[in-house]
Amino acid sequence: MRVAEHYYSERPTSPPRLGLLRCRLRGRDFEFLTSSGVFSHRRIDAGTRLLIESMILPEDGAALDLGCGYGPIGIVAAKLRPRLQVWMTDINQRAVALTLENARRNGAENVRVLAGPLYEPVEALSFDVILTNPPISAGIRKAVEPIIEGSIGHLRPGGSIQLVVRTTKGGRSLSALLERYYGGFEVIARGGGYRVLKAERS
C-alpha cells in the first residue's frame, strides 16, 4: 500500500501533473503554473484567497511568504508593492521551482525564492511582515508553533505576522499560541469558515 505524499515533503516523488490557474486577486489578473505534490494545486484555496485579499502590506521594506507553495501570496504582494522586497521560502523543492517560474510569468521582479525548512533559508534576515497559510494538518506543535515562535526573532519592531486559519480546524489552538507569544492578536478578515489573524511585534 502506497503512503500518501504530503505537500510539505522536501522532494515529492510522485510524477508531476502540471496545471495552469488563471485568477483575479486584489483586482489584478494572475497566472500560476501548478503541479501535483504541492498544496492546493487545482485552485487557489479559500484560506489563501482570504489572506491575499486582506493582507496588510508596507509600501517598502521586506516581506516573507513562509511556506510559499507555488507562490500566490508572495507574488501578489510583490506586484502590489513594487518597492517591497519579498522573500519566499518552502521546504518543497517542486514548489520552489514553480514559484520561480510563476514570478517570471507574472513579472514579479522584487522576489527572492529559497528552498529550506521554516526560517532556515532566511536565518540572518528580519522582516516588516510575515505572511503564511500554515500547514495545520502537519500538527500544531510540530509545524505551526515553530512558525509563530520563530517569527518573533525575524520581525522588525512594529512588524506583523499575518496568517490564515480555518475557524473549526486549529483556530482555537493557533489563537492561543498568538496570545502566548505576542500577548494578543486581531482578526483582520473573516469568510468561508476562515479567519486571518494579525499579531504585531512590539
Image (tube, rainbow, N blue to C red):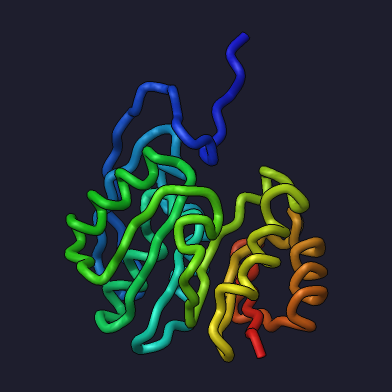
- Residue 70, above or below 110: above
Q: Nearer the viewer, residue 26 or 159?
A: 159
Q: Specify the quadrant that holds the C terminus.
A: bottom right
- Residue 88, above or below 190: above
User: With 84 as the anchor, is 201 left or right in this view?
Assistant: right
Q: Quadrant of residue 106?
A: bottom left
Q: Residue at x 48, y 77 (%)?
A: 127
Q: Specify the quadrant that holds the N terminus.
A: top right
Q: Residue at x 74, y 80 (%)?
A: 182
Q: Residue at x 31, y 62 (%)?
A: 112
Image coordinates for residue 95, horizontal then vertical, percent: 39, 44
Image coordinates for residue 99, horizontal then vertical, percent: 32, 51
Q: Nearer the viewer, residue 120 or 80?
A: 120
- Residue 140, above or below 128: above
Image coordinates for residue 178, horizontal then vertical, percent: 74, 73
User: With 125 as the anchor, is 33 left or right in this view?
Assistant: left
The residue furthest front is 124
Residue 55 visible within the image = no
User: With 70 as the anchor, is 196 left or right in this view?
Assistant: right
Q: Nearer the viewer, residue 10 or 186?
A: 10
Q: Quadrant of residue 84?
A: bottom left
Q: Quadrant of residue 174?
A: bottom right
Q: How many numbered discs?
A: 0
Q: Residue at x 58, y 89 (%)?
A: 157
Residue 49 visible within the image = yes
Image coordinates for residue 56, horizontal then vertical, percent: 48, 83
